[in-house]
Image (cartoon, rainbow, N blue to C red):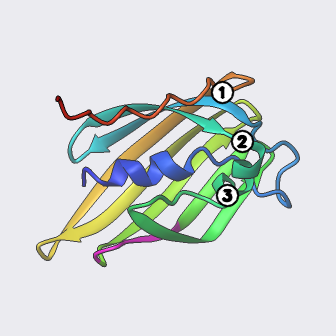
Amino acid sequence: MRLMSPILLAGLAAAASAAAAATPIQPGYWESTNRLLSPVRTKSVEKRCITPADVAKFMSGPSNRHYTCTYPTRSFRAGKIVLKGSCVSKKGRKVAVAGTGSYSATAFSLNADIATEFAGLPIAGQASTEARRIADTCPPPEPPAEEAQPSS
């Protein structure tokens, strides 16, 4: 279940599909607080740069590098979010996701019910994401760490 929070984290920077929303999220520097509320409580905070090119990707619904997700039910209209679909991990683990929330150009909130199986036992949980745009521009990327030089 600990991996479920990244499902919300990656895609919940989403706010709307271009066709369905009058006010999609604005590009900029965003901070999100992601919580897995049950069955185990976890919390993570992430800051990320969302460029104009990233907005459409995030607006398609939660997904990330760990899970591939599809949302047959996906609505971002009039400031309200409704999502229902499923995600599959690279190892084939399936997770059902159903969420509701609200959004604006500079903030969003989403609560989701998640369900999966572990060792053949059904496991249900709840997760949430609260995000807000904290700056118009993103900080410069950190320089890569220098490789250690062998001593002579």
The x, y position of residue 89, in whole percent, is 35, 70
Identify the main secondary structure in magenta. Answer: strand
Q: Which residue is mark 3?
A: 57
Give the residue drawn at x 57%, y 32%: 131
Please report the bounds of the magenta region as a residue range: 85-91
Q: Please name whichever residue, 49 or 87, is drawn nearer the observer in this view of the structure.
A: 49
Q: Please name whichever residue, 88 or 125, is drawn nearer the observer in this view of the structure.
A: 88
Task: Using the numbered discs, state the Cα–Cα distance from disc 2 to disc 1 in whole angstroms.
Answer: 9 Å
The x, y position of residue 83, in whole percent, is 58, 60
Q: Secondary structure at mark 3?
A: helix
Q: Which residue is mark 1?
A: 138
**49 to the left or right of 26:** left
Q: Which residue is mark 2?
A: 51
Query: Which label's residue is closer to the chain start, 2 or 3?
Result: 2
Looking at the image, which residue sits at the far left? 119
Q: Please name whichever residue, 54 or 2, is drawn nearer the observer in this view of the structure.
A: 54
The reply to whether dot 1 and dot 3 touch (C-beta < 8 Å) is no
Query: Which label's residue is closer to the chain start, 1 or 3?
Result: 3
From this view, report whether residue 31 is shown above or below residue 3: above
Mark 1 crowd level (few <14, some 14–19, many ≥20, 10 Å Cα): some
Q: Which quarter of the rendered picture does the N terminus lie within?
A: bottom left
The x, y position of residue 74, in whole percent, is 66, 64
The reply to whether dot 2 and dot 1 touch (C-beta < 8 Å) is yes
